[in-house]
Image: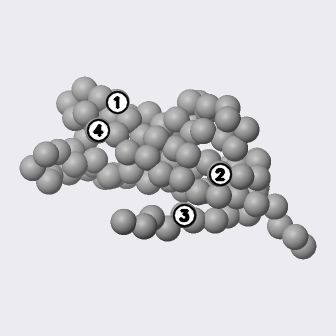
């Protein structure tokens, strides 16, 4: 399976989303959910807030500051144990 990687301009605010499902395919809310973002420099950012949109649906908005690839991982624990990753790329504008 090929995954499309989104591209953004450095300095842009990016919305990362997570959907949490149980083994039966039902939307669930973990007791806690957190995000770790690996910056292009290799530094890990764990300070960002995850927002609940509705049952099983979450997002985190992040303002990018570096050119390169970002990788993020949502982890939910407690009532539902879930994890998922994604990535995107940022580059400076040539204008």
x and y, in percent, of residue 23 in the image:
13, 46
Q: Is residue 15 left or right of residue 66?
A: left
Q: CA distance from mark 3 to mark 2?
A: 10 Å
Q: Residue at x 71, y 52 (%)?
A: 68
Quadrant where the image shows the N terminus: bottom left
x and y, in percent, of residue 25 in the image:
14, 54
Q: Earlier in the sequence, mark 1 or mark 2?
A: 1
Q: Residue at x 67, y 32 (%)?
A: 43
Q: Residue at x 38, y 50 (%)?
A: 18
Q: Is there CB contact under 8 Å for labels 3 and 2?
A: no
The residue tagged 2 is 69
The residue tagged 4 is 82
Q: Is residue 59 left or right of residue 54?
A: right
Q: Is residue 91 left or right of residue 6?
A: right
Farthest bottom residue?
95
Q: CA distance from mark 4 to mark 3?
A: 22 Å
- Mark seen at residue 4: none
- Mark seen at residue 32: 1
Secondary element under disc 1, as helix, strand or loop, is: strand
Q: CA distance from mark 4 to mark 1?
A: 10 Å
Viewer-side label of 1, 3: 3
Viewer-side label of 1, 2: 2
x and y, in percent, of residue 70 in the image:
62, 48
The residue tagged 3 is 5
Farthest front residue?
1
Viewer-side label of 4, 1: 4
Q: Earlier in the sequence, mark 3 or mark 2?
A: 3
* Mark 3 nearby-residue class (10 Å; few <14, some 14–19, many ≥20): few
Quadrant where the image shows the C terminus: bottom right
């Amino acid at each position: 399976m090929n995954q499309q990687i989104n591209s953004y301009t450095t300095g842009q605010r990016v919305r990362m989303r997570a959907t949490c499902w149980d083994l039966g395919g039902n939307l669930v809310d973990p007791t806690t959910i957190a995000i770790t973002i690996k910056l292009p420099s290799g530094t890990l950012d764990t300070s960002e807030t995850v927002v609940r949109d509705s049952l099983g649906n979450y997002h985190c908005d992040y303002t990018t500051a570096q050119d390169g690839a970002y990788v993020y991982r949502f982890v939910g624990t407690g009532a539902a144990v879930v994890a998922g990753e994604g990535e995107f790329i940022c580059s400076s504008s040539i204008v």
